[in-house]
Amino acid sequence: MIKVLMIEDDLELAQIITDYLKSFDIEVINTDSPYNGLSMLNVHKDYQLIILDLTLPEIDGLELIPKIREKSNIPIIISSARDDILDKVMGLERGADDYLPKPYNPRELQARIKTILKRVDLQNEPKKTEQNSLFEVREDDMQILFKGVALTLTLAEYDILKLLIQRNHGVVAREDFIYASDNIEDESSLKNIDVIISRIRTKLSKIDDTQTYIKSVRGIGYQLI
């Protein structure tokens, strides 16, 4: 069962959320005291996520987030009736993972909890080392070796070359690169792919200039050869 700590002074809402999430195998323990919530986080290390209101007695929720972050990297969903964009930005910048404005459907809260915890599980999985005859991808330190030599890559270059290696000589459409990477600028994204590929080719050629290792596939994308 997933165990969630809720810090919410609206006890009626807290009970509604608690009863609803229980049917999804999510146990919610609520406190209306921010400082008590911090103490509970210290004592019970098995909480997997925090649902945090902002307008609280004793201390504002925005001030509480840094105190939580001093102790734990536990995911935080802000649940608040305050709809000022500044509150949302400050909450996310201080370390919250999501912001859910009240009123909301408890089903949406359940979906967000599931999504965040799935992402955390993926991040905690042991990183793989992928290797073929020419390239080696080391995910632990986000490094790619070409013929045993470490390449100096930007985040976007790393994402693109990694996808080409994973496709094992298959053709990768330009759109696939965009979907696979958060590090490619949205504006003129398809043209940016061509520029990034060109930079990767240049870096590969400094190690081996006897051939081109990334082939253009007209009208589609690119292929590692």
Image: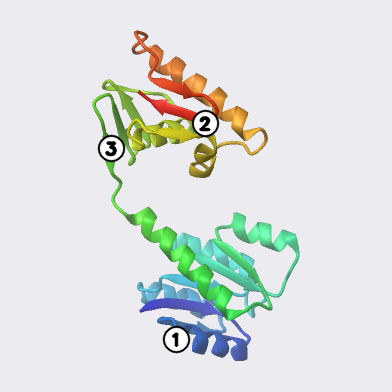
Q: Pinpoint residue 47: horizontal percent, then vertical percent.
A: 40, 73
Q: Residue at x 52, y 64 (%)?
A: 67
In terms of secondary structure, where does tag 1 sit?
Answer: loop
Q: Residues within 10 Å of mark 3 (few under 14, many from 20)?
A: some
Q: State the count of labels.
A: 3
Q: In terms of depth relative to the viewer, which is nearer, 220 or 159?
A: 220
Residue at the farthest front position: 219
Residue at the farthest right position: 84
Amino acid carrying label 2: it is Ile
Q: In terms of depth relative to the viewer, which is nearer, 197 or 129?
A: 197
Q: Pinpoint residue 57: horizontal percent, then vertical percent.
A: 64, 80
Q: Residues within 10 Å of mark 1 (few under 14, many from 20)?
A: few
Q: Please identify the quadrant where the C terminus is shown.
A: top left
The residue at which mark 3 appears reads as 130
Amino acid carrying label 3: it is Glu
Gap between marks 3 and 2, in whole Å?
25 Å
Q: Residues within 10 Å of mark 2 (few under 14, many from 20)?
A: few
Say whether marks 3 and 2 touch (CB < 8 Å).
no
Amino acid carrying label 1: it is Ser
Q: Residue at x 34, y 12 (%)?
A: 208
Say whether marks 1 and 2 touch (CB < 8 Å).
no
The residue at which mark 2 appears reads as 220
Q: Along the horizontal axis of the image, is 61 left or right of 120?
A: right
In terms of secondary structure, where does tag 3 sit?
Answer: strand
Q: In terms of depth relative to the viewer, which is nearer, 191 or 52?
A: 191
The residue at which mark 1 appears reads as 23
* Mark nearer the N terminus (1 vs 2): 1
Q: Please identify the quadrant where the N terminus is shown.
A: bottom left
* Mark nearer the N terminus (3 vs 2): 3
- State the image quarter where residue 171 is shown: top left
Gap between marks 1 and 2, in whole Å?
47 Å
